[in-house]
Image (cartoon, rainbow, N blue to C red):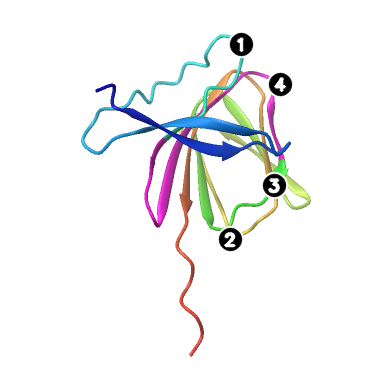
């Protein structure tokens, strides 16, 4: 058993891609290397309420503005990232984190070869009584 399974995700272009997931109890490589030739997104695990991803991004590349239906944290593991949020941007250095509210329009760009850990809270808030 490899410790990975496949799950499908959509790129901003709408193109479906398979993202490997770790299996419960299996170790996962969360090193900061950017794979040769580009992105190497890995959903470390995805549960009903939570998804944790490793996102290496080569310098000068990134993810265009998009929304995610949950709260997000983006932690810069290595390199330098620029996180766009609404009309502002913030640079994250290695070890820094930015919190984004539910459905916030945001983008990510690597200033240098970088790696981020992204956490998405997927739970829907309880309905108002």
Residue 66's label in the rendered image is 3
Q: CA distance from mark 2 to mark 4?
A: 26 Å
Q: CA distance from mark 3 to mark 1?
A: 23 Å
The quadrant of the picture occupied by the N terminus is top left
Residue linked to disc 4: 60
Per the rendered image, the range of residues in magenta is 44-64
Is 34 situated left or right of 63 in this image? Answer: left
Residue 9 in the image, given as x and y percentages of width and height = 56, 39
Residue 102's label in the rendered image is 2
**Label 4 secondary element:** loop
Q: Residues within 10 Å of mark 3 (few under 14, many from 20)?
A: few
Whichever of labels 4 and 1 marks the residue nearer the N terminus, that label is 1
Q: Residues within 10 Å of mark 4 (few under 14, many from 20)?
A: few
Task: Tell us which disc is closer to us: 4 or 1.
Answer: 1
Is 129 situated left or right of 45 in this image? Answer: right
**Label 2 secondary element:** loop
Residue shown at the point (52%, 51%) measured from the top left: 72
């Amino acid at each position: 058993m490899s410790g990975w399974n496949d799950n499908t995700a959509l790129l901003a272009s709408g193109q479906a891609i398979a993202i490997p997931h770790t299996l419960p109890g299996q170790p996962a490589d969360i090193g900061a290397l950017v794979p040769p030739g580009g992105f190497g997104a890995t959903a470390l695990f995805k549960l009903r309420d939570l998804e944790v991803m490793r996102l290496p991004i080569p310098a000068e590349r990134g993810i265009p503005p998009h929304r995610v239906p949950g709260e997000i944290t983006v932690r810069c593991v290595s390199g330098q990232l620029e996180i766009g949020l609404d009309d502002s941007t913030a640079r994250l250095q290695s070890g820094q984190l930015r919190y984004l509210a539910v459905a916030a329009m945001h983008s990510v760009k690597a200033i240098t070869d970088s790696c981020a850990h992204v956490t998405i809270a997927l739970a829907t808030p309880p309905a108002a009584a």
